[in-house]
């Protein structure tokens, strides 16, 4: 009985391999199950195909990069996932997603069937007269290209030139790039009002927008209702000497004084965020950020989460607008 119990509790290792190493569309791919145990097997091949055979053969109809998953005995803990690239005889490239929108990262990968190891080179190209994307790859001459689109377009072309064993192939694909909803940060300086849409760590170029006026005309950082209580700038001066403006969130107060500070709402544990004089500030609770203006730029950082108000994230610059007097967030 002891021996049987030990066998029953033996850990199952899940793994698999496939052949050939460079499989082609329309040709059979053999998957070899290397699981150390189990009685039931569930395969998904990434293109909608499935199998319950222990070591199945499968044919992909189209070239591309797919995610293959093997699950043993129906348990999520007994799962192995691998990426497989299916080639065509003619060089091509695949994208990391099937839908595209602005200011998200995408990777394009060359798929070159080269079982004999011939010399191969790559060159990615975007039209110089259509600056609709920013390349984040270090080079345009690798087997992959990383970028994000900065403009919504019905047809955004990407080219790849492949030279394989002296033969050149030019590949062109076009992608529909959609706009997407996002927060905006509004600014006012002597030149007018500006709107800047925020996309994660990136921001769209600022542009004048009359719809910013009502939010910027509203009371900025001198009065706030928080948890049913009204906080006024005049009432906070005894606790926070020199305070010029404030915002409250998650039992913390962010306030402009000699620079920018964060403290507990009762005034304890004050920590300075910015030493330069701040002319305006606001909080974005949806994206969990604070924005503030110095004399010659607007900066931001995540809201502080520590109990002692210490932070490790360095503030970053969002734009170089000078003389900003008001900031607001439009969700």
Image (spheres, rainbow, N blue to C red):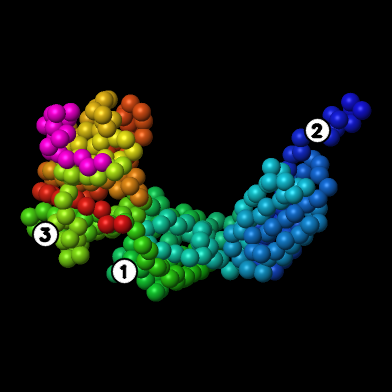
Does the magenta portion include 241? yes
**Residue hosting label 2:** 9
Q: Identify the image quadrant of residue 130.
A: bottom left
Seen from the viewer's position, the closer of residues 263 and 295 is 263
Outermost bottom residue: 154
- Mark 1 falls on what kind of element? loop
Front of the two marks 1 and 3: 3
Give the mark, 2 or 1, whose residue is nearer the N terminus: 2
* Res 203 visible: yes
Identify the secondary structure beneath mark 2.
loop
> What number is the disc on residue 192?
3
Can residue 276 be seen in this snapshot? no
Nearer the observer, disc 2 or disc 1? 2
- Answer with the quarter of the image where residue 65 lies: bottom right
**Does label 3 or label 2 sit earlier along the sequence?**
2
Question: Residue 328: x percent and y percent?
Answer: 22, 52
Give the camera-side residue of 242 and 82: 242
Q: Is residue 98 above or below residue 221?
A: below
Q: What is the secondary structure assignment of the residue under circle 3?
A: strand
Q: Residue furthest left?
A: 190
**Left or right of 208, for residue 65:** right
What x and y, as percent, mark residue 178? 40, 68
| Position of 75 relative to 183 (above/below) | above
Residue, x 75% and y 54% (percent of image)? 42
Q: Does the magenta stretch include residue 8?
A: no
Residue marked by disc 1: 130
| Residue 249 point in image, percent of width and height | 30, 40
- Image quarter hosting the N terminus: top right
Which residue appears at 12% of the width and 37% of the height? Answer: 234
Range of residues picked out in magenta: 229-244
Q: Disc 1 versus disc 3: distance between alpha carbons?
A: 29 Å
């Amino acid at each position: 009985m002891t021996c049987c119990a030990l066998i029953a509790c033996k850990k199952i290792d899940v793994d698999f391999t496939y052949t050939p190493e460079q499989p082609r569309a329309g040709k059979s791919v053999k998957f070899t199950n290397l699981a150390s145990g189990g009685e039931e097997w569930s395969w998904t091949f990434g293109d909608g195909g499935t199998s319950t055979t222990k070591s199945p053969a499968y044919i992909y109809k189209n070239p591309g990069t797919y995610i293959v998953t093997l699950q043993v005995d129906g348990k999520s803990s007994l799962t192995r996932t691998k990426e497989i690239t299916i080639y065509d005889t003619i060089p091509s490239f695949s994208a990391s997603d099937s839908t595209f929108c602005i200011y998200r990262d995408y990777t394009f990968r060359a798929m070159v069937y080269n079982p004999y190891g011939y010399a191969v080179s790559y060159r990615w190209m975007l039209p110089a007269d259509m600056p609709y994307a920013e390349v984040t790859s270090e080079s345009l001459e690798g087997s992959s290209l990383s970028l994000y689109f900065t403009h919504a377009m019905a047809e955004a072309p990407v080219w790849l030139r492949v030279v394989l064993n002296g033969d050149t192939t030019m590949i062109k694909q076009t992608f529909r790039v959609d706009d997407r909803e996002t927060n905006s940060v509004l600014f006012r300086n002597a030149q007018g009002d500006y709107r800047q849409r925020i996309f994660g760590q990136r921001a769209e170029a600022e542009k004048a927008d009359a719809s910013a006026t009502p939010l910027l005309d509203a009371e900025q950082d001198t009065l706030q209702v928080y948890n049913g209580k009204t906080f006024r700038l005049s009432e906070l001066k005894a606790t926070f000497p020199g305070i010029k403006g404030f915002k409250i969130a998650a039992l913390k107060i962010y306030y402009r004084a000699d620079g920018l500070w964060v403290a507990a709402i009762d005034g304890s544990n004050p920590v300075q965020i910015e030493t330069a004089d701040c002319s305006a500030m606001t909080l974005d609770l949806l994206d969990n950020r604070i924005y503030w203006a110095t004399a010659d730029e607007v900066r931001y950082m995540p809201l502080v989460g520590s109990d002692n108000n210490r932070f490790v994230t360095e503030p970053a610059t969002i734009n170089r607008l000078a003389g900003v007097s008001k900031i607001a967030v439009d969700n």
